[in-house]
Amino acid sequence: MSGGGGLSDPTISGPTLRPYLRRKKSSLGETKIAVLGMEGVGKSALSVRFLTKRFIGEYDQSSETKYRHTVLIDGESINFEVLDTRSENEDCGARDDVLRWGDGFMLVYSVISRKSFDILQELRQKIEDAKKGTNIPIIVVGNKSDMAHVRQVTKDEAQKQASNFGCPFVELSASEDVTNVVGAFHTICREVIEFKRRSRTFFDRVLGAFGRDKPSS
């Protein structure tokens, strides 16, 4: 997939992407989102739909693509970095450098592919292993709802899986539901911001405890 069409500051990968994934601590106003999932589930369609509001049906995803984009969420300006990953050897884009880089993760499956749904559990575990923790911000997105007549994954079972993960869920069509696509990215952004706030509060408490003067005897 080539960068263009109004997309903001694309960085095309292949072997050149890895250096740009060096992990830098992001502020509350910055959000790094990696879009993960099997080849063909519509990761590029979702990313481009969010960034440009346009739908392009055919993609040549020979490389990963990272985009920078600024949006207004809940009255706050957020600098998005969206990594549209490429699935290599069915790894769904979940490589170590990608998982360390991301603040939050969009786990995408296709409602017409059982295999793409079943692999979500493995993806979630990889994220938690890489981040060395639980409750990492993720959202489960079921794409291609416009093809429900040939679906292999019901909305109810996907909702149940997301509940087991403790994360938001949305079923949509990248080709038809621009509002829901944008909403999905905004939701994972809010999850990231809330996670950072909780983490910051925790570390402030820890540092505050160590910084207090011991009572004199």
Image: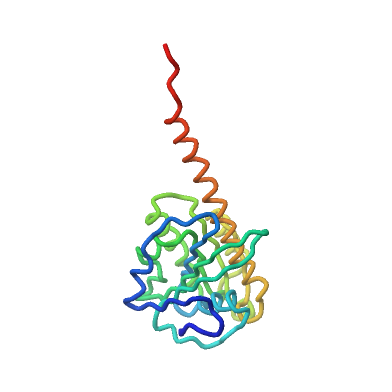
Measuring 45% from the left and 17% from the top, which residue is drawn there?
215
Looking at the image, residue 142 sits to the left or right of residue 15; the answer is right
Residue 44: image x %, image y %? 51, 78
Q: Is residue 64 above or below residue 193?
A: below
Which residue of the protein is positioned furthest toward the left in this rendering?
Answer: 15
Residue 1: image x %, image y %? 46, 84
Q: Is residue 152 above or below residue 126?
A: below
Q: Nearer the viewer, residue 217 or 56?
A: 217
Task: Indicate the colouring scheme.
Answer: rainbow
Task: Tally the numbered discs.
Answer: 0
Q: Is residue 216 above or below residue 191?
A: above
Residue 81: image x %, image y %? 49, 67
Residue 187: image x %, image y %? 61, 61
Measuring 47% from the left and 77% from the top, which residue is drawn there?
10
Measuring 55% from the left and 78% from the top, which residue is drawn there?
48
Q: Nearer the viewer, residue 136 or 148?
A: 136
Which residue of the protein is positioned furthest toward the top in this rendering?
Answer: 217
Q: Quadrant location of the C terminus? A: top left
Q: Nearer the viewer, residue 28 or 45?
A: 28
Measuring 59% from the left and 59% from the top, which residue is drawn there?
168
Looking at the image, residue 125 sits to the left or right of residue 109; the answer is left
